[in-house]
Image: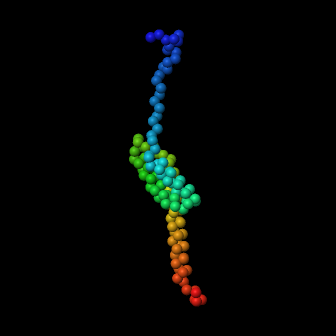
């Protein structure tokens, strides 16, 4: 085979390309945990209902972290899982505090309605 170039060996690489390391995929629930964590914490300040998904973010983040530790050749340790877990913890704490305040407010309302001040009211 003839080449149009004067010396065809000049343009060839002497060694094949080095193999590129394969980046392991993140756990499928890692992204889910992060999205639920963001929706839970950020949604709390807009509308109170999204805070209810924060315990799910905590759970999914913990599952993704645990499975990434068990199968290091299958999944990489994704920052999304840790972020979702931390946001889930924060959102669950906010949810617990909000439920505690609702319970205290409800108790105070019930006590104040049943309390007789003695002034004929």
Q: Does any portion of residue 84 appear in the rendered image?
A: no
Q: Nearer the viewer, residue 9 or 44?
A: 44
Indicate whether 24 appears above or below 57.
above
Q: Quadrant of residue 48?
A: bottom right
The image's colouring method is: rainbow
- Can residue 28 be seen here? The reply is yes
In the displayed image of the protein, which residue is found farthest to the right?
A: 119
Give the answer, above or below, for where 64 lies relative to 73: below
Residue for point 58% across, 87% down: 121
Q: Where's residue 37, x and y in %? A: 51, 54
The N terminus lies in which quarter of the figure?
A: top left
Going 51% across and 67% down the picture, which residue do you hit?
99
Give the number of callouts: 0
**Is 61 or 114 nearer to us in this picture?**
114
**How far across and how far down the image is residue 87, in percent?**
52, 55
Q: Position of residue 105 (x, y in %)?
A: 54, 73
Residue ID at (60%, 89%): 119
Please give the name of the residue rendered at 53% of the width and 55% of the height, measured from the top-left corner: 39
* 119 relative position to 17: left or right: right
Q: Farthest residue to the left: give it.
A: 70
Q: Position of residue 118 (x, y in %)?
A: 58, 89
Q: On screen, 58 above or below 13?
A: below
């Amino acid at each position: 085979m003839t080449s149009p170039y004067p010396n065809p060996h000049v343009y060839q690489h002497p060694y094949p390309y080095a193999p590129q390391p394969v980046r392991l995929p993140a756990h499928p629930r890692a992204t889910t945990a992060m999205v639920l964590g963001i929706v839970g914490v950020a949604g709390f300040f807009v509308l109170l209902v999204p805070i209810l998904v924060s315990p799910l973010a905590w759970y999914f983040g913990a599952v993704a972290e645990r499975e990434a530790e068990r199968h290091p050749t299958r999944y990489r340790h994704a920052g999304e899982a840790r972020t979702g877990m931390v946001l889930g913890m924060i959102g669950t704490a906010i949810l617990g505090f909000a439920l505690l305040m609702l319970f205290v407010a409800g108790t105070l309302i019930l006590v104040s309605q049943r309390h007789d001040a003695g002034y004929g009211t």
